[in-house]
Image: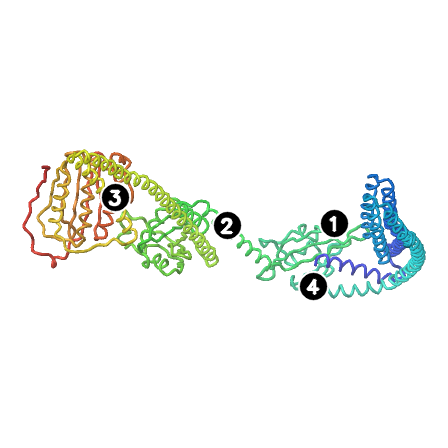
Amino acid sequence: MKSRNLNAWLAIRNGVDLATKGGEKMDSPIRSTLWSAYGVLVVLIVAGLALTVGILHLSDKQEYRIVEGSGPLLDAVSAMNDDTLAIMSAARGFALTKRSQFQQQYDEAVRDFRKSSTNAVRLASEPRDAERVAKMRKLFDEIKLYTDQEMASAIDGRDGNANEFMVAAAKEHSSAPDYTGTMADEHARQERADLQRITGMRSRLTLLMVIVSLVVIAIAAFLIWKIQQSLMASVERQVRRTETMIAGMSDGVMLVDAEGKTAFLNPAAQRLLNRSELGVPIFKHAETYGLVNDEGAPIDAKELPAARALSTGRAVRDDTMRIASGDRQIAISMSATPLHEDGHISGVIVTFRDITERLRLEEELQLQAERAQILADAGAFFASNIDPVWVNQAIAERVAEVLGDWAAVILKSADTNELRVASIYHREMASLGLAWSYIYRQPLIVGEGIIGQVVSTGYPSLTQNLGTSSPVAPQSELEGGYHAAPMKLASLLILPLRTRREMLGALVIAANDPERAMTDEKLPLAEILAERAALAIENAKLYTEQVDARRKVEDLSRLKDEFLSIASHELRTPVTSIKGYTQLAKALIRENDLVTSEEYLDVALDQIDRMSRLILELLDVSRIETGRLEIRREPIPWSTFVCDVVHRHHTAVSDRRFQLNVPVSNKRVVGDRDRLEQVLGNLMENAVKYSPDSSEIIVSLEERDDQLVTSIADRGIGIPSDELGQVFERFHRGRQVSSTNYGGLGLGLYITKQIVERHGGTIWVESREGQGTTFSFSLPVVNAAEQPVAPTAQEPRAIAAS
């Protein structure tokens, strides 16, 4: 638009000059330009003619070469004729002398003919030539038939027949037309005729080009003369069009003359300036037209684009200023272009347009760009680490720095409705305690309080101008010395932190300073930041879950390897013992040593029992994992049951002293007798296995509310404190336990825990390394209405080894 404005004004000024001088007084530069163009046109035409002649001569050479191109075909045909004569001569020589060299010449001539004929077929582009080549090949085949029979007769010693075949071949050749000469004559005549025709055509084309060139020169001269005659009228029309165009332009146009006075204002300029005065000197432009800077002060006359263009002679582009019109200001972009005439500046064209809306859009785009940068930085910052604690703190810090004065991340507990403060950050460290105090005065439960409501409903909450923030703590508590002073909040925004899968919690954004208070314009940015924060929290959570899952898989793999190693050892050992002792017993039976053989068979039976227990443990684990472990429930008088099980176990283990601390009780539990005996047996077997010989094992029973707690204590090697949480896991064996000293698969305590839990009880362990271990488990007591009459009381007693 600016270049068009400049051209329009130049056209106006040139048009005015032409109108005053008349068509006969056209400027010499225009006239010289037109005739220079005419001279160039003549030169181009002459050059075209020369080029045409050159092309024609070049075409003569090319076409001559094309005509001479029939030579390879004639050479090939001549070679075919020579090869035909060659096989006839070679056959005759062989018939007369019987020498092998004629046989070789014959074969070479046949090969040469095949090659020449193939080449001739390829070069014969005309049907007539192709037909003659085919006839020559047919003639060759007929002659070759005679010569082959001639040579065969000579080999067989039939010279008379050989002469007959030679004569037949000669007659066949002599009776055939001279294909080679005929083709050569026809090609020569055709080439001369084509050459004469092309030469005549080129001569006519050259004459035509000369005539056309002369006509073009004459027409060009006439057109230039017509252009010269109509130029004045065209300029006058252009002046009128330009004046109309400038009057209808939306941009303001001002013409300043060489003296610095306003000479012209188009309607758009008058409308933008709200003025129409002309003749205003340039040093009064700012005052008259209300030109001010961004601060509202009048612009210095020397800084105006028109003044700078007049003084320097260089164009000034896109100076931003404002037009003060009443109580409003219009932002404009002003440019000034000097008009040069005869080596001096004759004036300045000033163009300006309203850019108020553009500046508003630029500010909005700048704001959006800043928001996009904030989001990009926040996303990169949140994703720079996947530790959940770090991510939560990073979210609070970045949000507080961008929006508000402080921020907190509140997360929902996995299995309850409680909320917890994952992180909190205040831009001023001295006020961090007040932020903590405010958060902890809120009910941190889903559905309660403003934070809980946001987490429950998923809808954000914005509160402004809260004043003193003490919505929960009563005034009496706030006056106490240990309570923090209340915090004044200019705004409080609580946004839900949620993903597609679940609600994670809430993001609290608060502002103490009114200048940093949350506004409607900042809400979209805050919501997007909350979405990015939720995504970062979820990614950290998923990563943690993935790490835990990988660790569990690795632990399971390790346990599997350990189990396979232990199981193979534990199952192989009794099998080896059984096999060895049964072989020994068999040998002793043969020797009638029945006493010793019976002892060996008892050892083998013990190993069979050990293997059976290992297999039963594996079957129990399988039933537990597949949910097929059956529990047959019946009321059991627990005190009597425990005493009976201890007596049976003591009978099997005669080198331990069992101390029973079982009070008189008629309490019963409901459960499976076999499985509960398995629990007591496993715990007592562990106590026996890991305690010294002749040591004491204490079995005690205690009533706690509606639970019966049974404990088995030993004075054995104990369990390290860091392994107490793993003793009930599958295949777990302590690091101080080796399979050579203590057998087993590490399944007994796991099975025990599963059985106890399926009876509605719990099991735990207390131990100090080197001082012994106490395993305790609790079972719920059966309803009192279902209890039978109490049995005879039993006093606590000790069962010693017999």
Q: Position of residue 548 (x, y in %)?
A: 37, 46
Of pointers 4 and 1, the one earlier in the residue sequence: 4
How crowded is the residue under tag 3: few (<14 C-alpha within 10 Å), some, or many (20+)?
Answer: some
Q: Nearer the viewer, mark 4 or mark 1?
A: 4
Q: Quadrant of residue 279?
A: bottom right
Name the element at disc 3.
helix
Q: Position of residue 322 (x, y in %)?
A: 61, 57
Query: Which residue is under mark 4?
Result: 249
Q: Nearer the viewer, mark 2 or mark 3?
A: 3
Give the distance between the C-alpha atoms of the residues marked 3 and 1, in whole angstroms. Answer: 107 Å
Q: Nearer the viewer, mark 3 or mark 4?
A: 3
Amino acid carrying label 2: it is Ala
Q: Residue at x 65, y 51 (%)?
A: 300
How crowded is the residue under tag 4: few (<14 C-alpha within 10 Å), some, or many (20+)?
Answer: some
Query: Which residue is under mark 3?
Result: 614
Give the distance between the C-alpha atoms of the residues marked 4 and 2, in whole angstroms. Answer: 43 Å
Q: Which mark is residue 313?
A: 1
Amino acid carrying label 3: it is Leu
Quick one: 62 or 579, which is closer to the camera? 579
Give the distance between the C-alpha atoms of the residues marked 3 and 4, in whole angstroms. Answer: 101 Å
From where the camera sits, is residue 443 visible?
Answer: no
Of pointers 2 and 3, the one earlier in the residue sequence: 2
Q: Nearer the viewer, mark 2 or mark 1?
A: 2
Amino acid carrying label 1: it is Gly
Contact, mark 2 vs mark 1 (Cβ under 8 Å): no
Query: Which residue is under mark 2?
Result: 376
